[in-house]
Image (spheres, rainbow, N blue to C red):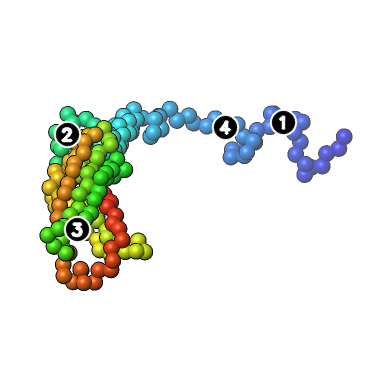
Amino acid sequence: MVTAESEPDFSLSSTFEPPPGHPLSEEDEPVDSAPGFWQRKAVRIVLGLLALLAVLLLVVQVIRHERDGIAARQPNLRPALATLCQYTGCELSALRQIGDIVIEGAAFAREKTGANDYRLSFTLRNGATVPLAMPAVELSLLDTQERAVVRRVLMPVDYGAPTVLAARADRAASLPLTLSASEAAALPPIAGYRVEAFYP
């Protein structure tokens, strides 16, 4: 068997060892025994505290947003909610749920004393199990095409009501309304009226 001088002879050499840095080299990589940044105990404690703080802030935000409903359902929590609003710049007011306010027995008629004098009567009923904010009332006078030709908005103070309507309670109101001479002159024949409750 003849080998050329240019070819390396591995038959007489010891076990082949790739040069350092070769992909086949089996150099032992140094093992880093120190824990990573996120595995450190102090870092984990700080992260836990930050997560707890985020949860607390979320709870406070939800309570602040739902403060009126909480105060209506749990009146004993009103002082604590008032303190929360004092520090967070919110305002604690009566709960607004216009869907639970119903107008009953509405009537609109001309007074006997004058041509431009009318009387509006209605009853507001709270169908909810909690106290609700007293709504405003809009009176619309309709022509023969059921178009509103005159609108009047009445706030609770205008019809002598308190700011809160108790749970399952009702409030009757009757008040005179007078049209100005210009309104009466421009007024087409009145065919009907509409009374609606709303929160401004």
Q: Are marks 4 and 2 in contact (CB under 8 Å)?
A: no
Q: In the picture shown, does residue 115 fall above or below 164?
A: below
N-term mark: 3 or 4: 4
From this view, report whether residue 197 is shown above or below residue 116: above
Using the numbered discs, state the Cα–Cα distance from disc 3 to disc 2 in whole angstroms: 45 Å
Q: Which mark is residue 13?
A: 1
Asked if labels 1 and 2 touch by Cβ distance under 8 angstroms, the answer is no
Q: Which residue shows up at 20% across the image and 53% down it?
A: 120
Look at label 3 and name its amino acid.
Answer: Arg
Spatial distance from mark 1 to mark 4, Cα to Cα? Answer: 21 Å
Q: Nearer the viewer, mark 2 or mark 1?
A: 2
Residue 175 position, x and y percent, is 15, 52
Q: CA distance from mark 2 to mark 1?
A: 92 Å
N-terminal-most mark, 1 or 3: 1
Quadrant of the image for the N terminus? top right
Q: Percent x, y for residue 189? A: 28, 66
Q: Relative to residue 35, is residue 88 depicted above or below? A: below
Q: Earlier in the sequence, mark 2 or mark 1?
A: 1
Mark 4, residues whose alpha carbon is within 10 Å: few (<14), some, or many (≥20)? Answer: few
Q: Which residue is mark 2?
A: 78
